[in-house]
Image: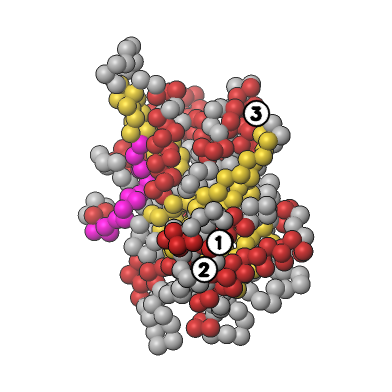
Amino acid sequence: MPISDHPIVDLFDNVERASPSTPTSAIASVNDDPEEAMKKETKSMRDSIIDILSDFKWFCLAVVRLGFPGLDDSQNIPTVAIIVLPDSNVTVGEALDVACKVADYVYHNRFEQLYDVAVEVLSMDISPLHDTRVSEFMADIKYTFEDAFDDSPSIGVSIENPSGNSGVGTLGGYLRVSGRASASSIDVPDSKIKYMALTCHHVLTKNEAPYEFTTSGQDIEPFVNCPSFDDFWCWQQDLSLSDMEKNKDLRRLREMRYKGSRMNARQQNILRYYEAKYIKTKPMIEKLEKFDIVLGNVYCSSGVGAQAGLCNSDFDAFAKITHYDRSLVPPWRIQSLQELKESLNPTANRQPIWKDVVCKVGKRTGRTFGVLNQIHPSMNVRSSRNGEEKSRTGRTVLVLVPKAALDDTKTFGSPGDSGSLVYDYEGKIMGIYFGGQRYEPYNPPIEVSCVDGLHFVAPIAPTLESIQAVVKTDPAFSGYDVEVEFLWADENGWDDNEWDENE
């Protein structure tokens, strides 16, 4: 459940002001006048805890209501969770020391009203992790680690999957990059358009040979899998050009006609059907030629249920773009939003939390639901380049999956879901899923808190702003004024009636 109205919600990010009970050493130097020091603002609780963790290899700082076995919801108090990764080599002694320091700060010295808050240092296998090889590769093409992870992390850049499952993810949507020649441009076309896939960078980066892309000029061709056919509302399915050219049976039928061989009525009908599809598909293929190859080829079209490795050019989205003279195309339907609201309406034994429910549709786990945490957690990502370690701290959105909603086979997200769009209860796109904790039993089991189901989402607004800023510096658009449009769905939500009248 969400953190609700616990005092820590307001205290965690608000800048503290000195009070008579606050030790002056916490807010001022020894040379400050005590009365003046009382008036000074100090850091927020979040920033102060981050300072305490400065020499500690932490990955995520979050305040979550994780839950305690045997207690009802009213007794489940928030936990300040300091999360480290299994490969951080943090000892039990180091974890105990930092937990005591944070606990002393939180409710012994400063915030007596937070006596019920637990402070825990948790070692969790959260995937994906950051990969220094990827950050070095990006720096070679003038995209630095600092660009990838600033105040707000964008699309999980420089974070990769430790399981070796890189190259498999979920296509979140499309971006259309439109350029108009600026007034000072000379000898360039008046306009230029590229279509780009919206997903996580680690989905499209092959870690085993990241340098081939720039050193040898070879194309990197990872594949991106869309959600399966059953998971979203799709329109007409069309046959791709590659199917027409590569299908052995169709080639045989064309050869039979060319040689004048006798064909029965069924064979003739099949050939006419697919050739008509070919004619319809041709203008869509011309659209595909504008697809930005830097992001790799996209296999498995939206609306076609297929497993990884089946090569179907994703022209289905371009069919929608062609069909409608507008910048938006209908999104899939995650399920009836009205049904979702009704199923989550408050009952006598449950608080109204349905407005905190979010949904995503991913390649691996399909349609899943979680609950928004009310405090955006801090993430600390480290990378090294040329022997120099760099550390960046930013914010992300945390989605919780209550323990009652978990089972052994399905969580909010798993490897392969990276890049999925995450929707709020109104159907608005609020972010992109880029990583989370896997469901794994702990041995020995953790008795204090339920730590299953913590998942990370990059907010959509700073993500699109980051993409806009990067595209403007793209040499391919030198001399153009660039605009980026989101094509897969409206980030401001949608009106069911608007799309129904066009069906």
Specify few, some or many for label 1: CA neighbours under 10 Å numbering under 14, 14-19, or 20 or more: some
Q: Is 116 rendered above or below residue 129?
A: below
Marks 2,1: beta carbons within 8 A: yes
Q: Give the extent of the magenta segment.
A: 484-497
Q: Is 490 within the magenta?
A: yes
Which label is found at residue 222?
A: none
The color scheme shown is secondary structure
Visible residue check, residue 442: yes
Name the amino acid, label 2. Answer: Thr
Residue found 53% across the figure and 43% down from its top: 149
Q: Residue 372 at x, y = what percent?
A: 46, 65
Mark 2 or mark 3, which is nearer the start of the sequence? Answer: 2
Give the CA separation, mark 2 to mark 1: 7 Å
Considering the numbered disc 1 on the image, is that residue within a helix, a strand or a loop? helix
Specify few, some or many for label 3: CA neighbours under 10 Å numbering under 14, 14-19, or 20 or more: some
Residue found 68% across the figure and 62% down from its top: 98
Considering the numbered disc 2 on the image, is that residue within a helix, a strand or a loop? loop
Residue found 41% across the figure and 49% down from its top: 460
Visible residue check, residue 316: no
Which residue lies most toward the top here? Answer: 187
Name the amino acid, label 1. Answer: Ala
On the image, numbered disc 3 is attached to which residue? 211
Q: Residue 474 at x, y = what percent?
A: 44, 27
On the image, numbered disc 1 is attached to which residue? 26
Q: Is 220 rendered above or below residue 62?
A: above
Mark 3 or mark 1, which is nearer the start of the sequence? Answer: 1
Give the CA separation, mark 3 to mark 2: 54 Å
On the image, numbered disc 2 is attached to which residue? 22
